[in-house]
Amino acid sequence: MPLDQPQQASARFVTVDVFTDRRFGGNPLAVVLDAAGLSTREMQAIAAEFNLAETTFVLPPRSADHTAQIRIFTPRAEMPFAGHPNVGTAFALARERLAAGAAFPAAMRFEEIAGLVEIDLLETGGRPVGARLRSPQPLTVGDAVAVGVLADACSIRSVDIATTRHAPLIAGCGAPFLFAELANLEALAAARPRESAFAEHLPRERAAGVYLYVRTPGGETDIRSRMFAPLHGIIEDPATGSAAVALAALSAELGKESDVRLSMRIGQAFEMGRRSLLDVVAVKAQGRVIETFVGGSCVPVMSGIIELAAS
């Protein structure tokens, strides 16, 4: 249906900042709360208009046992699964329930392209303060990527890419990313994405983006990271829960322990001035990663109406 003939006249939205405890930190998310009358084309256009890393659209669930069907869009494409949109959407829906005079549930279940996403609400004093999700798919590890390709795509030196634990490789728990460890924080800060190199070597169907990280044990965080996805219209993402949880799973997978519960705090986008803190967990039993989780705090920012009727 053409955009000048919308199926519904307006839609309510809220925005929240995810993986932060303060406004204008973390990763901003727009949540369109009543999207049942929107076409896919309209959803994509609205996501491009917000121009945030992702925008979610809340629709009635197909099953009465589930909370909602959630569709997730970057400015350029739909995503099968993503971390901060799920955490932020659960937080936003819990606040909507409270505002309507109803109690919010301890857990929510979202139907998404990648599968069913289970989410626990985090609360303080009876009010939601964040959420934690369980990844909808187990860890999958794909092909390795040449060091030179990664260096070219992210404008970094090949010598600054650490390969002792693993070569740059594709992995994911519902959405694939190219993971690469860097030697130090200076190399991480110097990285800049080159869209032409992404288009040539890392198309969207191969990897949603590139996730660079540095180990920072003993400090506020265990990992510092950055994520680039220029082909999705995201030059740099302030917080990437789907990649963070996959990194935890990958770290557990590569570890020598047969049974372990690996917990990490990941700090992302410090270089952008949008300090994000993500708490991730990977559970490994009998040599196999069986569960992965990512969560954090959220804060509300804005609310409003999207006018869709022709002027």
Image (tube, rainbow, N blue to C red):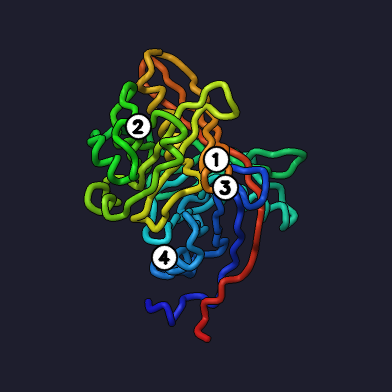
* Front disc: 4 or 1: 4
Q: Residue at x 37, y 59 (%)?
A: 77
**Amino acid type shown at disc 3:** Gly
Whichever of labels 2 and 3 marks the residue nearer the N terminus, that label is 2
Label 3 secondary element? loop
**Residue located beneath label 1 in the image:** 119
- The Cα–Cα distance between marks 2 and 3, rounded to whole angstroms, is 23 Å
Label 2 secondary element? helix
Q: Residues within 10 Å of mark 3 (few under 14, many from 20)?
A: few
Q: Is residue 90 visible?
A: no
**Residue located beneath label 2 in the image:** 160
Whichever of labels 2 and 1 marks the residue nearer the N terminus, that label is 1
Q: Residues within 10 Å of mark 2 (few under 14, many from 20)?
A: some
**Quarter residue 277 falls in:** top right
Q: Residue at x 43, y 34 (%)?
A: 213
Callouts 1 and 3 close, C-beta under 8 Å: no
Label 1 secondary element? strand
**Residue located beneath label 4 in the image:** 44
Viewed as shown, does residue 205 lie left or right of 235? left
Residue 118 at what x, y percent from top left?
51, 40
Instruction: Note whether 71 is above or below 216 in the view shown.
Output: below
* Front disc: 1 or 3: 3
Q: Nearer the viewer, residue 129 or 108?
A: 129
* Front disc: 2 or 1: 2
- The Cα–Cα distance between marks 2 and 4, rounded to whole angstroms, is 37 Å
